[in-house]
Image (spheres, rainbow, N blue to C red):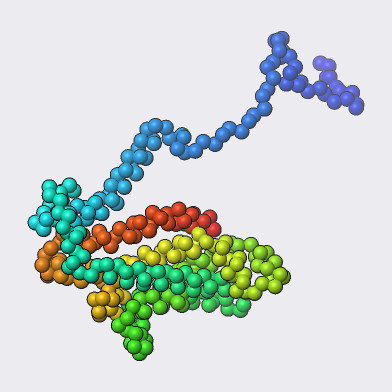
Amino acid sequence: MTQLTTPPGDTPSVASPSSSPPGGGTAAPRRAARPGRVRHPRETAGPAGRTVRLVGLAALSVIFIYPFLWLISASLKPSESVFDNVLIPHVFQWENYTGIWDEVPLLTWVGNSAVVTLAAATTVTISSAVVAFGFAYFRFPGRNVLFGLVISTMMLPAVVLMIPQYLVWNWLHLASSQIPLWAPNLFGSAFYIFLLRQFFLGLPRDLFEAARIDGASYWGMFWRIALPLCKPALVVTFIFEVHASWTDLVRPLVYLRDPQLYTVPRGLKAVLDQFGEGGEMRWEVVAAASVIVTVPMIIAFFICQKHFVEGIATQGRKG
């Protein structure tokens, strides 16, 4: 048997893609493999998957919306039909909404809540941003330990601090005013400090170093660079505190004695005591007052929805 060898200096020829196959004919040229387009899960689910998803979302929406729809329905019913669990009343009693303004100073309570809520949200947003910027920008010994102590205050229940805080405000002769409802926010909140600090840590430090070279002060860097860049996080902090302050009942129960100083939750407690259980048993009046004080929060959410979602998404990317 004779073995074929390749002469020195020669390389064996390799058949090209366009060479003829052994059986004759011409082979089709190979096409370069192109990366396929990655399909979104919604595209691969098909009509059945989209239908199931829409049905599930609709069912969850009904579950969450039904209590508020029931509240609106109950506020439009006569007293004897409030709890009949029928969404469309047989008789619409619009007098429930007109009469509540004559029964209690609801407009005054809404105004008090608006003032307290705006003061609380503004103060806690600014103070928490200042503290968070200090923890994010400055490097000093014990920074992590101090930040850990700030975060550890979140583990303290609010009832633990209730009596010491009341004693302080009583010593200042302010225990019967609205100041204790928002003034503690001047010292920031541990949760908001943590939230804003994480956002500040994601900002390029070169921006602040360049500002320092140009002669900017620390306050100038915070006010002109840090705050504009963390606007979504500030909006989220502001909205969270607006909701927390608007729905807060514990502190108004502790501090407020004068009905003219009541906030919305404290006023609703008074309405419940007067017209609800233990009172005149006019639950339609309680339902009407509840609807009136709930609508502002719904309107505020829809107005700030874009900024709220943007802030949450930005925080998710930062995290």
Q: Residue at x 11, y 58 (%)?
A: 79
Q: Is residue 31 visible?
A: yes
User: Number of numbered discs present?
Assistant: 0
Q: Residue at x 66, y 64 (%)?
A: 207
Q: Nearer the viewer, residue 93 or 186?
A: 93
Q: Residue at x 35, y 37 (%)?
A: 52
**As drawn, 97 above or below 116:** above
Residue 208: name its quadrant: bottom right
Q: Farthest residue toward the top?
A: 24
**As drawn, 212 above or below 293:** below
Q: Is residue 248 visible?
A: no
Q: Nearer the viewer, residue 178 or 55?
A: 178
**As drawn, 167 above or below 22:** below
The quarter in which the N terminus is drawn is: top right
Q: Farthest residue toward the bottom?
A: 171
Residue 76 position, x and y percent, is 17, 54
Residue 143 position, x and y percent, is 57, 76
Q: Nearer the viewer, residue 227 or 58?
A: 227
Residue 223: name its quadrant: bottom right
Q: Nearer the viewer, residue 208 or 136?
A: 208
**As drawn, 71 above or below 253:** above
Q: Residue at x 12, y 70 (%)?
A: 278
Q: In the rendered view, does 77 fall on the left or right side of 38? A: left
Residue 172 position, x and y percent, is 37, 88
Q: In the rendered view, does 226 fall on the left or right side of 110? A: right
Residue 114 position, x and y percent, is 35, 68
Q: In the rendered view, does 148 fall on the left or right side of 83? A: right
Q: Farthest residue toward the right?
A: 8
